[in-house]
C-alpha cells in the first residue's frame, strides 16, 4: 500500500520541484489534477494528450523520484443543467480517461455530478428528503433521465480504455453515500466505483469502516483519498451538520476538514488501512490537504508521518499458525 498525495496544494511549484519535495518525504505515489476543480498545474491535459514525447518526459521524471501516478483527477459537474458547463466537464473527464490510458494509469478520480431538479431548471439541486413529493419526483428525474443515461455511456468509454472511474462520494453531488454509489455502479459497469474519501462520510454520520466493507464486497473501491474531518459537537448539537458557514469561519462551523490524525487518531487510521486490506484494496492512500488550520506543507508532512506508520509495505504472509 502506497502513501500518495494529490499534488494540488503544491500547484505553485513546478512539477519537478513538487515531485522532489514529495519523494523527500517518503511519498510513493502522486495523484495529478488535469482539469476541473483540481486544476492542471502539474498535468495540463492538452499538452500531454497524444504527445509521446511529453508523456515520456513525465515517466522519466517519475522514475527519477521513484514515484508512480495513482490516478488522474478531474472533479467537475458533467450533469450540470447549463449545457456549456456540462460539456466542458464531460470533455475533461473523457479526455482524462483517454490520457490515463496513454500514460498507463488505471484510475481517474471525479464527481458524479448533480443535475437540476427538472428539465426546465437552471441550477443543480441536491435533494436530501423525499417530501414534499415533488422532491422525490425530482430525484427520480435526476437518476433516470440524466445520470444513468450519461454514466452508462461514460462507463463504456472507460471500459474501452480499461481505466477505472473513481467517483468521490460528495454532498452536493448526486452520489454522496455508499448506497448511491452502488446504484450508479449497478446501472453502468464495474469500471465505475468509488474514490473512497472518508472525510465526507464522517460528518454525515456514516461509519467509514462499514462503508469500506459494503463497497469492498463488490470490488467497488477504485482509489482512496486520505482526508480527515472533525465534528465539533458544540456547534453540531445546536444546528446539525448541514453547515453553510464558510470553511474559514472555523469557530462557527459544525465540522472542518482536518489533516490526517487531527480528526481521528492514528489508531483509527490503522484500522482504516486494515479494513481496506481486508476487502482487497492495496493501492494508494492519496492525501488531499484541505485543512484551513494549517499550511499545505505542514498538513501534508503531518499526514505523511501518520500514514507511514499505518500502511502495510508487504503482502500478507502465510498464516502458518493456522496449520
Image: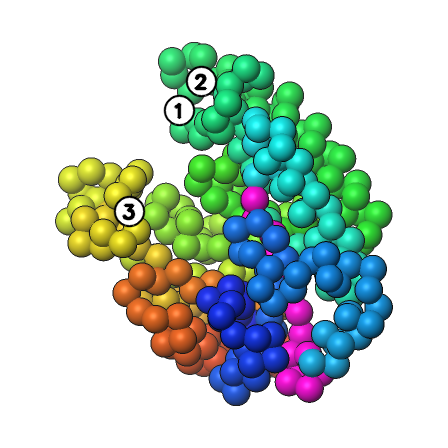
Residue 192 lies, with reference to residue 17, above or below; the image says above
> Which of the pair 268/118 is nearer the observer?
118
Q: Position of residue 77 (x, y in %)?
A: 57, 39
Residue ID at (64%, 40%): 88
Left or right of residue 179: residue 68: right
Residue 168 visible in the picture: yes
Measure the C-alpha gap from mark 2 to mark 1: 7 Å
Residue ID at (57%, 32%): 80
The coloring applied to the image is rainbow
Residue designated by label 1: 129
Task: Decide: few, some or many residues near mark 1? Use Cα within 10 Å; few <14, some 14-19, many ≥20.
Answer: few
Q: How many marks?
A: 3
Secondary structure type for disc 1: loop
Check if mark 1's residue and mark 3's residue have beta carbons within 8 Å. Answer: no
Check if mark 2's residue and mark 1's residue have beta carbons within 8 Å. Answer: yes
Measure the C-alpha gap from mark 2 to mark 3: 26 Å
Residue designated by label 3: 246
Secondary structure type for disc 3: loop
Which stretch appears magenta?
62-76
Mark 1 or mark 2, which is nearer the start of the sequence?
A: 1
Residue ID at (55%, 71%): 4
Residue 9 lies, with reference to residue 197, above or below; the image says below
Q: Is residue 73 magenta?
A: yes
Q: Position of residue 83 (x, y in %)?
A: 63, 29
Amino acid at each position: 500500500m502506497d502513501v500518495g498525495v494529490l499534488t494540488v496544494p503544491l500547484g505553485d511549484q513546478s512539477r519537478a520541484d513538487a515531485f522532489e519535495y514529495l519523494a523527500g518525504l517518503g511519498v510513493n505515489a502522486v495523484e495529478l489534477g488535469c482539469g476541473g476543480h483540481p486544476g492542471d498545474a502539474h498535468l495540463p491535459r492538452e499538452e500531454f494528450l497524444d504527445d509521446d514525447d511529453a508523456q515520456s518526459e513525465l515517466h522519466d521524471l517519475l522514475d527519477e523520484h521513484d514515484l508512480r501516478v495513482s490516478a488522474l483527477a478531474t472533479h467537475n459537474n458533467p450533469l450540470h443543467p447549463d449545457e456549456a458547463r456540462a460539456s466542458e466537464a464531460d470533455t475533461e473527464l473523457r479526455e482524462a480517461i483517454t490520457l490515463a490510458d496513454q500514460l498507463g494509469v488505471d484510475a481517474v478520480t471525479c464527481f458524479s455530478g448533480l443535475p437540476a431538479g427538472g428539465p426546465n431548471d437552471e441550477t443543480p439541486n441536491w435533494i436530501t428528503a423525499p417530501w414534499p413529493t415533488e422532491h422525490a419526483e425530482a430525484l427520480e428525474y435526476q437518476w433516470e433521465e440524466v445520470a444513468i443515461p450519461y454514466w452508462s455511456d461514460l462507463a463504456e468509454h472507460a471500459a474501452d480504455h480499461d481505466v477505472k472511474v473513481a467517483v468521490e462520494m460528495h454532498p452536493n453531488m448526486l452520489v454522496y453515500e455508499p448506497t448511491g454509489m452502488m446504484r450508479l455502479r449497478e446501472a453502468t459497469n464495474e469500471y465505475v466505483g468509488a474514490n473512497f474519501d472518508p472525510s465526507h462520510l464522517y460528518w454525515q454520520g456514516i461509519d467509514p469502516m462499514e462503508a469500506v466493507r459494503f463497497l469492498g464486497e463488490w470490488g467497488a473501491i477504485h482509489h482512496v483519498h486520505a482526508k480527515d474531518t472533525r465534528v465539533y459537537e458544540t456547534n453540531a448539537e445546536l444546528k446539525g451538520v448541514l453547515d453553510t458557514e464558510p470553511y474559514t469561519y472555523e469557530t462557527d462551523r459544525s465540522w472542518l476538514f482536518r489533516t490526517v490524525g487531527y480528526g481521528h487518531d492514528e489508531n483509527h487510521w490503522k484500522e482504516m488501512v486494515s479494513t481496506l486490506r481486508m476487502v482487497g484494496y492495496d493501492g494508494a492512500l492519496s492525501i488531499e490537504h484541505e485543512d484551513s488550520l494549517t499550511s499545505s506543507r505542514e498538513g501534508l508532512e503531518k499526514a505523511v508521518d501518520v500514514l507511514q506508520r499505518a500502511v502495510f509495505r508487504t503482502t500478507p504472509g502465510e498464516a502458518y499458525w493456522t496449520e
